[in-house]
């Protein structure tokens, strides 16, 4: 059975809402397979909870299914046998059923009810206002179509606007929890697994018994029958129109075209037509726009580069989508060879950099880096790129870092090159206090270890409790 890991903050929030003396209305949403239903089920364990899963059928079918579910829940045979043409009657009967425990009602895939009847959010708003808000009940509206959930429940134009008492947009599980899913895996294996599953619980479950990452890819992605072969279509088909245009954009970004002009050129569209596609994908947490971390006005910066945030989608659009002809004609071996040759260079190494940047925040929280640091990211100019730059925007501390996902231990030349590159960063050049941090999946040479002691460098392997290099405890206060 899949263990229930992480989500502690979300569970605590739901428990707080449950403990309210009055009714609560919580919006729980996020992309497919992110674990919304599992979270609701875990929260509802040993509680008085009614769970209803809406479908893409007509409103009448959904209402009948909900009526029968409420009839079973309340042991009301008359309701089950009745012809009911309004939701109000069903909720009336539900509220008549009293127990000594607070009632929780979960309406999962809520957006389908509004899709089948555009007036349903108004219907539910009236039910909430007239029946539920004063009934000391907890209602959780779940949904996996982000754009519809936002428009139906969160947007200012929604009839439900202002009714919610809280919302959770469920995100991927961070890398630091991966050793709890995959016991006895090495750090390198955990990075490989994270680069494929990206913190999505369902993907983690699929890759759970992996012994070799390439065999797992072949089994779970590289055949037309495998569960993840068509996954991007399922993710996007109900979120966007012109799905072909969005696929072309994501393929362009996956292939390394990160600037607006180049993306538009590859898609063969006008650059002025591109922002609507970019905004939609950013709103769906599929794409992000990066700027050098030292930019004062990121939203106005002309240095923006686009990256796919979902690690599985980044892999799929690099290796699967452009090679579907091989897979569809039984030549998956050709694609597998391409993956073996360039997976690390084109994909895993970039994911490792993101893992390292995220662990900088954990080092700050653990006081291994200056507490005042509040900006962490990448930095680049026309000639140079630095994997990690972190600084205190109101102080003098700045940290420069390098990440290496290679077969060899990191040597001292990386340190000297990083110091040279750091000279190109203009931020607070005269008064800053510089520190240096390094991440290497295969450790460090003796020379690098010795230099770390002399220079006060911080050496890390990965952000995994009890598996980090002992070198991380070296002083970082020396210049």
Image (spheres, grey):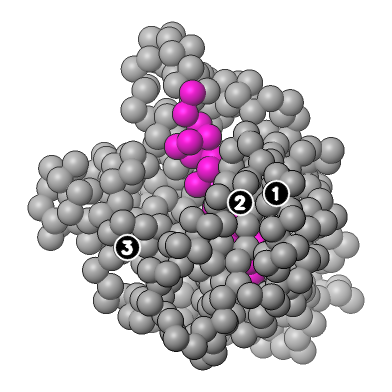
Q: Main secondary structure of the magenta part?
A: helix
Q: Are marks 2 and 3 in contact (CB under 8 Å)?
A: no
Viewer-nearest of discs 2 and 3 = 2
> SS at mark 2?
helix
Q: Position of residue 387 (x, y in %)?
A: 49, 58
Task: Determine which residue is flagged by label 2.
Answer: 412
Residue 48 visible, this angle: yes
Identify the image quadrant of residue 233: top left
Task: Determine which residue is flagged by label 1.
Answer: 447
Task: Determine which residue is flagged by label 3.
Answer: 381
Among the two numbered marks 1 and 3 on one chain, the one whose residue lies closer to the N terminus = 3
Viewer-nearest of discs 1 and 3 = 1
> SS at mark 3?
loop
Q: Categorize mark 3 by other alpha carbons within 10 Å: few (<14), some (14-19), many (20+).
A: few
Is residue 346 rendered magenta in the image? Answer: yes
* Location of residue 338 with respect to 380 vertically, above or below: above
Is residue 342 rendered magenta in the image? Answer: yes
Residue at 50% of width from left, 19% of height from top? 336
């Amino acid at each position: 059975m899949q263990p229930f890991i992480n989500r502690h903050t979300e569970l605590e929030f739901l428990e707080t809402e449950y403990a309210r003396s009055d009714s609560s209305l919580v919006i729980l949403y996020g992309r497919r397979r992110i674990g919304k239903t599992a979270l609701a089920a875990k929260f509802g364990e040993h509680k008085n909870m009614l769970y209803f899963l809406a479908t893409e059928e007509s409103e009448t079918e959904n209402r009948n299914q909900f009526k029968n579910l409420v009839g079973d829940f309340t042991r009301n045979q008359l309701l089950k046998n009745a012809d009911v043409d309004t939701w109000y009657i069903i909720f009336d009967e539900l509220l008549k059923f009293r127990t000594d425990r607070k009632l929780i009602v979960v309406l999962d895939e809520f957006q389908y009810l509004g899709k089948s009847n555009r007036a349903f959010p108004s219907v539910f708003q009236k039910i909430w206002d007239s029946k539920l808000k004063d009934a000391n009940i907890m209602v959780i509206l779940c949904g996996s179509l982000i754009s519809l959930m936002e428009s139906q429940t969160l947007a200012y134009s929604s009839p439900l606007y202002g009714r919610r008492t809280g919302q959770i947009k469920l995100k991927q599980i961070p890398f630091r929890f991966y050793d709890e899913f995959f016991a006895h895996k090495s750090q390198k294996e955990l990075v490989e697994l994270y680069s494929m599953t990206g913190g999505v619980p369902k993907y983690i479950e699929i890759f759970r018994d992996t012994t070799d990452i390439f065999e797992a890819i072949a089994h779970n992605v590289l055949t037309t029958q495998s569960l993840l072969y068509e996954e991007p279509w399922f993710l996007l088909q109900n979120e966007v129109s012109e799905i072909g245009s969005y696929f072309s954009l994501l393929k362009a970004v996956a292939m390394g075209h990160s600037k607006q002009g180049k993306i538009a050129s590859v898609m063969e569209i006008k650059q002025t037509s591109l922002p609507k596609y970019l905004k939609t994908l950013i709103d769906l947490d599929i794409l992000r726009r990066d700027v050098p971390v030292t930019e004062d006005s990121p939203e106005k910066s002309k240095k923006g580069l686009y990256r796919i945030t979902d690690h599985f989608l980044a892999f799929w659009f690099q290796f699967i989508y452009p090679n579907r002809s091989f897979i569809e004609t039984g030549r998956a071996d050709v694609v597998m060879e391409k993956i073996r040759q360039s997976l690390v260079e084109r994909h895993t190494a970039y994911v490792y950099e993101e893992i390292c940047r995220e662990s900088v925040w954990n080092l700050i929280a653990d006081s291994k880096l200056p507490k005042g640091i509040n900006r962490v990211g990448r930095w680049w100019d026309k000639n140079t790129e630095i994997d990690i730059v972190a600084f205190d925007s109101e102080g003098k501390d700045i940290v420069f870092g390098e990440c290496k996902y290679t077969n060899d231990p990191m040597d001292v030349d990386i340190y000297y090159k990083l110091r040279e590159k750091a000279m190109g960063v203009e931020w607070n050049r005269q008064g800053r206090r510089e520190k240096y941090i390094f991440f290497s999946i295969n450790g460090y040479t003796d020379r690098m270890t010795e230099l770390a002691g002399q220079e006060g460098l911080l050496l890390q392997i990965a952000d995994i409790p009890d598996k980090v290099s002992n070198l991380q405890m070296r002083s970082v206060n020396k210049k």
